[in-house]
Image: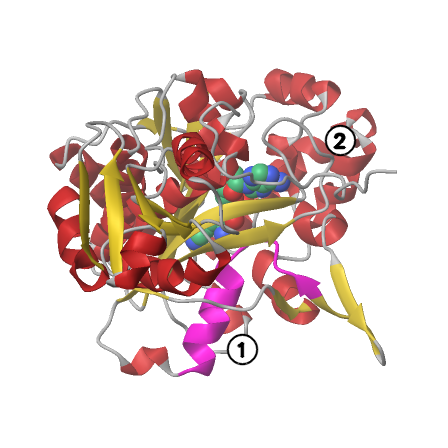
Amino acid sequence: MTPTRPTGTQDLLPDSGRAPLNLRAQAFEHIRSVARHVLTHAGAARIETPMFEPTDLVQRGVGDGSDIVRKEMFSVSHAGSHGDAVLRPEGTAGVMRAYLQNGLSQRPSPVRLWTDGPMFRAERPQKGRLRQFHQVDYEVIGSAEPALDAEAVALMWDVITALGLTGARIRLGSVGAPRDREDYSAYLRDMLTPHAARLSPDSQARLERSPMRILDSKDSGDQALLTELAPRPLLERLGPDARAHFDQVCSLLRAWDMPFDIDPGIVRGLDYYTQTAWEVHHGGVGAKSALGGGGRYDGLAAALGGPPTPAVGWALGIERVLIAMDTEDLDVPLTGGPLLYVAALGPEHVALAGRAARLGRAVGACELAARPIKPSAALGHALRRGARVIGLVGDNEAERAEITLKELASGRQITIPITDLPGALEALA
Ligand code: HAM
């Protein structure tokens, strides 16, 4: 029987240009390189953190009340231990841990960081919802300035537009200061408790500890009750500091011509957010699915045991971005075939052909034929790979340490000393 991959995972295959973008390894590479360009030009430095973190860190970071911690963690066990670590469901808690543990607070503030990689959530798989998915992640740590929130939103938008997407929309809101949220939770609890019997079991369980999550319930009965009771959104009940912060973020985004809609009822799936929160949506991925999301998380460092450290950041889901790009008929650059395909015409010439390939790699991709072949077979292989030049080493060439090069498009052929190969390829590249 053919072996199969785990549910909710994908194989990313070498590019043929025909498969959907979200299954092409090259397309992932393209997103990373566009993100790297945008983010490093904004002063972000690369960081990499482990793919598993202590369970306790993720619980304290992402939040005990979140679906992720309650239902979606993959625990990692090994001989002699069980469940003391989980595969990271997101990047922010790990990046903040690394910032605290490695003294990055000593660096000039704010510290702008970016990373990307696989994240793991044991969700029910569907289109754009996987158990192993990939994020590009941007985090700015060490400052509470609203300009950094606005800049973070703008950078996320820059990545999206640099990829050519035109159908995405930013939804921006504020989840307020912790105090605002406590007041708002009490307001919701008072409003919903008399109707608790009409809530879904999930929402009933949330009524006491996280009533705000009920607003995001996918249950139609819950939604009907909310429509009926029409609670005022949190954005309309912010305290003066959170209100001023939010207004400042909005006015900067307007000054930078960023298109965005205000979402007064924004609820993010992670507990660490304070103040600004946003998501970017795209019709091609489905109404409930965001391409990415982010926000300010001024309380995370302290929740992890560090000194209070303000921060803001976002993550884009690479698979969802690629699904959106496919619906807009966008493509990514194909990596062409090699510059040079080199073949030995006899077993005694493999060493020289291999030397030629090694020299040529200083200039571009050079692929060496797996075994000695005839010139006609070498030509067939080179054409199938989309090579630009074929290089042959036979008896005549070997005698003088030469190689014969043939440019496939023009048919032009030259024989040159092997040592001249980089120069000759340079002229073509
Ligand atoms: P998040 O909203 O949970 O935020 O995830 C960000 C993005 O990751 C989502 O918008 C989506 O594109 C993608 N994503 C999430 N779950 C899945 C899944 N099961 N399958 C496919 N894609 C998925 C965070 O993770 C925060 N750490 C973002 C952040 C960074 N906030 C501050 N800094």
User: Is residue 93 shown in magenta?
Assistant: yes
Identified by mark 1, the residue type is Gly
Q: Is residue 289 above or below residue 356?
A: above
Q: Quadrant of residue 382?
A: top left
Q: How is the image coloured?
A: secondary structure
Q: Amino acid at mark 2?
A: Pro
Image side of residue 105 versus residue 27, left or right: left
Q: Is residue 61 visible?
A: yes
Asked whether the residues under the numbered discs 1 and 2 touch, taking CB atoms below 8 Å apart as contact, a structural biologist would say no
**Picture coordinates of residue 246 (x, y %)?**
29, 43
**Residue 305, label in figure:** 1
Separation of marks 1 and 2 at Cα, in angstroms: 38 Å
Is 395 in front, or is 183? 395
Q: Secondary structure at mark 1?
A: loop
Q: Position of residue 183 (x, y in %)?
A: 53, 47
In this rendering, the label closer to the viewer, 1 or 2: 1
Q: Residues within 10 Å of mark 2 (few under 14, many from 20)?
A: few
Element under disc 2: helix
| The C terminus - image quarter | top left
Residue drawn at (76%, 39%) of the image = 7
Residue ID at (67%, 41%): 9
| Whether residue 114 can be seen here | no
User: In the rendered structure, which disc, 1 or 2, sits on the residue that comes first in sequence?
Assistant: 2
Which quadrant of the structure image shows residue 23? top right
Q: Which residue is mark 2?
A: 194
Q: Which residues fall within the magenta stretch? A: 86-102
Q: Is residue 373 or residue 224 the one in the foreground?
A: 373
